[in-house]
Image (cartoon, helix red, strand yellow):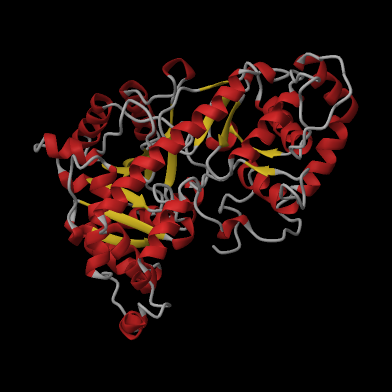
Amino acid sequence: MATNDQHGENSPYFDGWKSYDKDPFHPTRNPHGVIQMGLAENQLSFDLVEEWIKKNPKASICTSEGIKLFRDIANFQDYHGLPEFRKGVARFMGKARGNRVSFDPERIVMAGGATGANETVMFCLADPGDAFLVPSPYYPAFLRDLRWRTGVQLIPITCKTSDNFQISIEALQQAYENAKGENVNVKGLILTNPSNPLGTTLDRETLRSIVSFTNSHNLHFVSDEIYAGTVFATPGFVSVAEILEAEKHFNRDLIHIVYSLSKDMGFPGFRVGIIYSYNDAVVSCARKMSSFSLVSSQTQHLLALMLSDDDFVDRFLAESSERLGKRHKLFTGGLEQLNIKCLKSNAGLFCWMDLRPLLKEPTFDAEMSLWRLIINDVKLNVSPGSSFECHEPGWFRVCFANMDDETVEIALSRIRRFVGKENPKTKQNDDGNDKAQKKTKQRSWQKNLQLSFSKRNTMYDENIMVALSPHSPIPRSPLVLARN
């Protein structure tokens, strides 16, 4: 199992990370390197956290103010977790959902990030060979998290561009019937809400309809809500917990929530994953399995104090939302100036970018060729839609919250140059310096792409695949990085 190829690493999604690892951008040390736009990290509000840490030295057992608790925290803690930690997480989950619903600390189960949480849920709910329905496009590493070690199958529910990729009950019904027709034992449905990679939220009626459908077919519903606190525009986020609060007749034993602090707080390195199930048996089983992926007691201690600070949490969530909204507007506005559109979104750390007009032809081969040009020529690591099981070529996920404003402008400058729309009188070079550039004729995208293919495509096909091969040495594996 450890050595087979079912992990999912051999995909363009991870290959892009490897390309970045080989040639990472730095504004002074490597200004022409690859800019990482394939990593869904929330780095826009770190200063607020750093400010809190400075004001609360007792939260760390590694300070003179907090060392009195060193021995207690350093000693063994059972897999239930520190009570104050579970209370803090439960309280934070409620605040991230606008305090419209509350959570029971006794149902909080720890896991090693949402990666570990999702896998644990699959182990608890399904046997090898069983299947879970999942709306596509979906997070590429679901193949690893949900399927690799559990033996569970994933059955895509096709979501269409014409519906803005929103899941429909008709598509859900069709996928379920097709699976049953092939004698596949469907155990449930899993989806991300807010969506990764779309950055959209499900409206209340759609979410209610999904719960009604899964309940009526005795299917488990796993709601991955790790982006709950990243909503920056209307409509707001509706948790499946709110549906259960409003309608008591639904079977709660079939409802489970996966959460983490990786996205809302920007703490992927803390590896704090959470399973919240309304099913007592699942809570019990998941807690036993959590022995393999506990959160360190020092991390629990720090977060227990931080998440219990209501003033800080309220300020953080409000400020983070505002900053994400500004960054989203900055980036998508820059793309719009280049006639590049994105799916309208209101949450998340990324955009679902529409590059269909830039394809040589409407095929996935053309999508991959365009992706290689973006990696090798533009030096941006963006993720092609095919790695998210998108049924239509030409869509790309691009992350915007893991860098500063200056790097965003450099990325936009590179895109501007690539599509041939940069004004030679005012353009800046890749390292952000305002150097005068020689005036060049503006070239249309189609001509530029055609020349690129005719003169250099063979070189790209050979060299880039060697460079991005999963068998080539890399400085550090992307697999140890945060779930994205």
Q: Is 192 in front, or is 194?
A: 194
| Image spot of residue 74 (x, y percent) | 37, 82
Q: Position of residue 183 (x, y in %)?
A: 37, 38
Q: Quadrant of residue 245?
A: top left
Q: As rendered, which of 2 and 87 lies closer to the eye?
A: 87
Looking at the image, residue 45 sits to the left or right of residue 121; the answer is right
* Left or right: 260 in relation to 269: left
Which one is in front, 272 or 218? 272
Q: Residue at x 27, y 51 (%)?
A: 311
Q: Against 120, is 335 above or below?
A: above
The number of callouts visible is: 0
Residue 321, position as x, y percentages in the image = 39, 38
Up-down: is 33 above or below 479? above
Q: Residue at x 87, y 30 (%)?
A: 456
Relative horizontal placement of residue 385, taking residue 222 as reference (left or right): right
Q: Is residue 185 visible?
A: no
Q: Nearer the viewer, residue 287 or 46?
A: 46
Is residue 367 at least partly visible in the picture?
Answer: yes
Q: Is residue 453 above or below residue 249?
A: above
Q: Residue furthest left?
A: 248
Image coords of residue 480 (percent x, y):
56, 60
Kindly identify the residue that appears in the image at 18 percent across and 61 percent down: 106
Q: Quadrant of the N terminus?
A: bottom right
